[in-house]
Image (cartoon, rainbow, N blue to C red):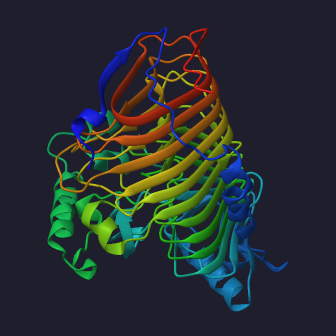
Amino acid sequence: MQNRRDFLKTLVIGAAGIAVLPKLTFGQSDGPWEITYRDILSRIKPPVFPARDFVITKFGAKAGIKNDSSDAIAKAIDACSKAGGGRVVVPKGEFLTGAVRLKSNVNLYLAKDAVLKFSPDAAKYPIVATRFEGMECMNVSPFIYAYEQTNIAITGEGTLDGQSNNEHWWNWHGSPRYGWKEGETNQKAARARLYKMMEAGTPVAERVFGPADRLRPNFIQPHRCKNILIEGVSIVNSPMWEIHPLLSENITVRRVHINSHGPNNDGCDPESCKDVLIEDCFFDTGDDCIAIKSGRNEDGRLVGVPTENIIVRGCEMKDGHGGITVGSEISGGVRNVFGENCKMDSPNLDHGLRVKNNASRGGLLENFYFRNITIGQVAHAAITIDFNYEEGAKGKFTPVMRNLVVDRLSVGKCQYGVDIQGLDGAPVEDIKITNSTFDNVAKGNVVKNVKGIQLKNVKYNGKLVGDLG
């Protein structure tokens, strides 16, 4: 570890300037885009399905939210998979279901004006192997779930409606804002119990939780799957995280429209995944729009699968905690994240590009590249890297963050241009910002425990600063 004197301690910099350190050695800014980025794209190939349709109404499904179509949908999925694959079609109309479990070679297709509504009855969601906030457990099934399947999809122009609100699912969070009332059970006791199980190394098979424990399920979770496509659908009213690929690879999330403002309503959270493309999506969420994860604390380190090779492009972010976020459950590490041609703009979006970590998580985070990002306004900072998140310095696992390159970032309004805070003995390393403009910055910047910032052609409140050539 470097001596503390080698770190940049705390600088709150006025709106007219930014901290500059001695010149660092960086490769050509386009190098990773020409090599790594293209290699990632060449491997991501959406699954293709046979031209066979299995319409759920032919298996007994009936429109109307008083008719439970769970069995009919399960029969259609089973028939489709056994036939070698195709589309399971939800036609125009509203259909009610419990948990949907996808099988290999099945494309769940929602026709235009089709609405698949998920029952608020927790008994309709069996106990399955999953993760809750990065911790391994057996819990209430995600609304749409697949385990160890290959070639699966959710596509179409229809809507997935979780029917979550302050009376159902959201109140499990335990916040009066989301409908919880004094005396009601909420997730806090069970979450604390799961945390202790994780720390003690309790076998996952013994970490069993159910509806009475109030640990909310995710909306969509492919778990240990390969070749995944989620395209075109709209998602509303999720209990918690909306699209949560877990320990999976070759994933395409394209032209998905997400609008859900409940607690922990992250939009898309690839966790311990490899080769992921998220493109042309719209996010208006109650938490991070995109949050890249790899497991919490002991579980993340024990499973030891990083999230790597992520591309986010052409997306639009409105409300949320962060636009493109890494963390905080990242103990398995994250590497090779690319983001380009995205727009972020809302007074209710806290951060643009965001990293959350601490000394309890640890994990190696490296090689993040962003270009052509337009931020209209954010409430806090355009770029945030925070090692003080939650537990902060309390822990024995040193967080490592290195090699963040941002090119052609345009910011219209924010409180801070950058808020980058490492820890004593754990600096954020190697930050490069080029060809970027920060306007209407109200409070300057916060830079603490950072080793190496290079600026080139950066305008800050109308003034060119830090041109290091």
348 sits to left or right of 372? left
Percent of width and height locating residue 425: 24, 44
Front-most of residues 397 and 231: 397
Between 138 and 34, the one lying in front of the other is: 34
Picture quadrant where residue 438 is located:
top right
Q: Is residue 456 left or right of residue 164?
A: right
Query: With respect to residue 320, does 270 lie above or below?
Result: below
Residue shown at the point (37%, 71%) measured from the top left: 304
Residue positioned most to the right: 51
Q: Quadrant of residue 138?
A: bottom left
Judge from the rendering whether residue 371 lies leftward or rightward of residue 141; answer left or right.
Answer: right
The location of residue 134, given as percent across then percent down, is 35, 61
Q: Is residue 219 left or right of residue 437?
A: left
Residue 274 showing in the rendered view: yes
215 above or below 8?
below
The quadrant of the image that shows the C terminus is top right
User: Does residue 290 sit above or below 56 in this rendering?
Assistant: above
Q: Residue at x 71, y 58 (%)?
A: 35
Total labels drawn: 0
Residue at 48% x, 53% y is 366
Residue 145 higher or lower than 403, as above or below: below
Question: Which residue is drawn at the image coordinates 61% and 41% (left, top)?
Answer: 370
Q: Is residue 326 visible?
A: no
**Residue at the bottom extreme of this rendering:** 82
Residue 334, position as x, y percentages in the image: 46, 57
Residue 195 in the image: state x and y as whole percent. 20, 61
Front in this rendered view, residue 281 or 115: 281
